[in-house]
Image (cartoon, grey):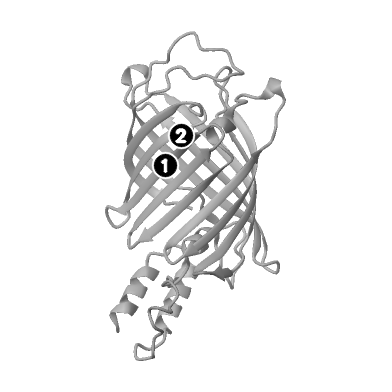
Amino acid sequence: MSAASLADLERCATIEDTALRLACYDAAMTASPPDRPRPSPLLAEPPSRTGPSLIEERWAIGVSGRDSRFDVRAHRPSYFLLARYTDAPNRLPTSPSKPSLPGDLDLKGVESKFQLSFKVKLADFSEFGGAAVWAGFTQQSHWQLYTGSQSRPFRESDYEPELMLALHPSLEALGWRWRLLVIGLNHQSNGRDEPLSRSWNRVYAQFGVERGDFALLVRPWWRIPERDSDDDNPDITRYMGYGDVVGVYRHGEHTFSALARFNARSSRGALQLGWNFPLGRRVRGYVQAFTGYGESLIDYNVRQNTIGLGVSLADFL
């Protein structure tokens, strides 16, 4: 067996979905023999992965021969940061529509942070270009784990349900392949009482393209207006902008990701970098760095730099 086919089989073994993993093995075992003429490197397209790509794996693209409704898939990253340091703890959260707190909150600059995210396929319309309806949910929590004198409270928890219609075009140009179009309705809130309540609703479109082991997702959004009396954070788009861009690169067992937001009118934005790497057979490490505004809803108008280290349950997309 050639070294190339061994690499293909090792790659197949990392696929979680049983049907996709078997399809990957079939493709690897029926690959063209090594003595078949190969195209010139100057004319060849970027190398493609054996088995599902980054986007295909997350959105169950190419699953055939079984009913994939109610499949549960990773949505956004799921991780637990055992320690996260910030250079600017938000001890006095503010919003233009809310009264100020009577005094500063007693917060430490080192805390824990975790995020859990998944999506479920509700309906499948394969006859319409592989269209599917998904429901997603993401929870991000900031935990003051190292404040024993205060019973280690949760500083902030943000809840983000969404409903999505996903389409899977397969168009190629200049070595890039368009594999994802999502139209979504998104609600995000922290479920807190006044004056710390924060929430907003958005409609968005997400476009996903890929090239080899690199995926790029562009997501513009439009905030659904609210009555002034109900708006917890009327200036949130000034800091969170009107969309985000995510880039993901997989190199062997390592995954590198970047998320960026920017509002050109206000010159506000954010950049988050992630590194997902193997620690053992079933444990993966995760490093996350953030700079800018809006790491959480309560911090939407606070600029800070943070870095955290922990374990990963599922990487980006």
Check the image and report above or below for 228 versus 217.
above
Residue 47 spot, x, y in % from top left:
41, 72
Is residue 74 shown to the viewer in this render? yes
Q: Which mark is residue 272?
A: 1
The residue lying at 36 percent from left, 40 percent from top is 289
Check the image and report above or below for 37 versus 272.
below
Tell me if mark 1 has few (under 14), some (14-19) or many (20+) residues whose alpha carbon lies within 10 angstroms of its own: some
Q: Which tag, 2 or 1, sits closer to the chain's start?
A: 1
Residue 111 spot, x, y in % from top left:
35, 29
Q: What's the CA distance linking mark 2 and mark 1?
A: 9 Å
Q: Nearer the viewer, residue 38 or 35?
A: 38
Residue 9 spot, x, y in % from top left:
36, 74
Amino acid bearing label 1: Gln
Amino acid bearing label 2: Glu
Check the image and report above or below for 188 versus 256.
above
Quadrant the N terminus occupies? bottom left
Is residue 63 shown to the viewer in this render? no
Left or right: where 187 falls relative to 75: right
